Image (cartoon, rainbow, N blue to C red):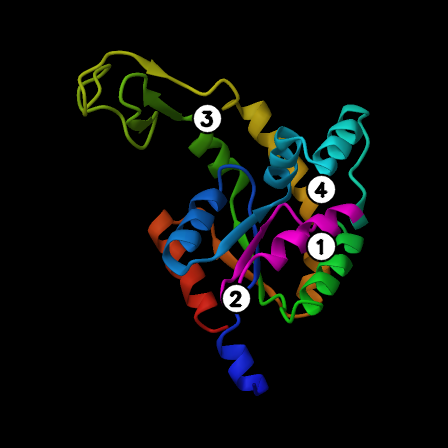
Amino acid sequence: MSSAEGASVTGTNIILLGPPGAGKGTQATRLVDERGMVQLSTGDILRAAVKAGTPVGQMADEIMKAGKLFPDELMAEILGEHLDGIPLSSGVIFDGYPRTERQAELLDELLANRNRKLDYVIELVVDEDALVDRITGRFTCATCGEGYHDRNKQPKVAGVCDRCGSTEFKRRPDDTEETVRTRMGEYRAKTAPILPIYAARGLVRQVDGMADMTDVGGAIAAILDKA
């Protein structure tokens, strides 16, 4: 097979970055549904291994209970096993990985050893104050789950759900300004080490994470269509 032919059947591989509330999960789900990409979350992988009681899961459980960091090389090995089960034609979304320069190096090795490459690092850029407003203002109907917002989407009749007529509403207990700003700080701390690495390689693309979710999806699609 020629290199051109190989490129035509190789899926697009990306790292999708964005703080909690930026819509990263929504966009990853869309990419999985619409493009057949596979989302690889290191957190999900480890939790599944722990729950299944696999040798790796038992090791991970012991490490996490001891409050230690999971070894980079072992995490890379686990990711490699998952990549081996994904057809080359399916692109991959890396979620929560890498977070350090060493992990970025290991990811390069993992991909190269499997005839893959990293195509883009897509960052959903948000305004912190606007994101705080977006998250802290949201609430839902306790009966049907219809979503509302203090400023952007109030029920047509105060205190009554538009969809089901319920008068019971709820908010997520962690949707507080303090919690949101803490998450933003953690996000900056985790992404700061890797963004310059990928920016130097011309892989970083930024998308306005504060735009309508459909528009965000369209912007990401436009980036991937160039791959």
What is the CA distance from the residue labelled 2 to the residue labelled 1?
Answer: 20 Å
Magenta stretch in the rendered image? 74-99
- At label 2, the amino acid type is Thr
> Which numbered disc, 2 or 1, marks the residue that appears first in the sequence?
2
Q: Look at the image and say whether residue 87 sits in the magenta stretch.
A: yes
SS class, disc 4: helix
Residue beneath label 2, please? 12
> Which numbered disc, 4 or 2, marks the residue that appears first in the sequence?
2
Residue pictured at 56% horizontal, 85% vertical: 1
Which one is in front, 110 or 154?
A: 110
- At label 3, the amino acid type is Thr
Q: Look at the image and say whether residue 84 sits in the magenta stretch.
A: yes
Pointer 3 local density, CA inside 10 Å: few below 14, some 14–19, many at least 20: many
- For residue 136, the mark is 3
> Which numbered disc, 4 or 1, marks the residue that appears first in the sequence?
4
SS class, disc 2: loop
Instruction: Estimate the x, y position of residue 41 in percent, counting from the top left.
Output: 59, 44
Pointer 1 local density, CA inside 10 Å: few below 14, some 14–19, many at least 20: some
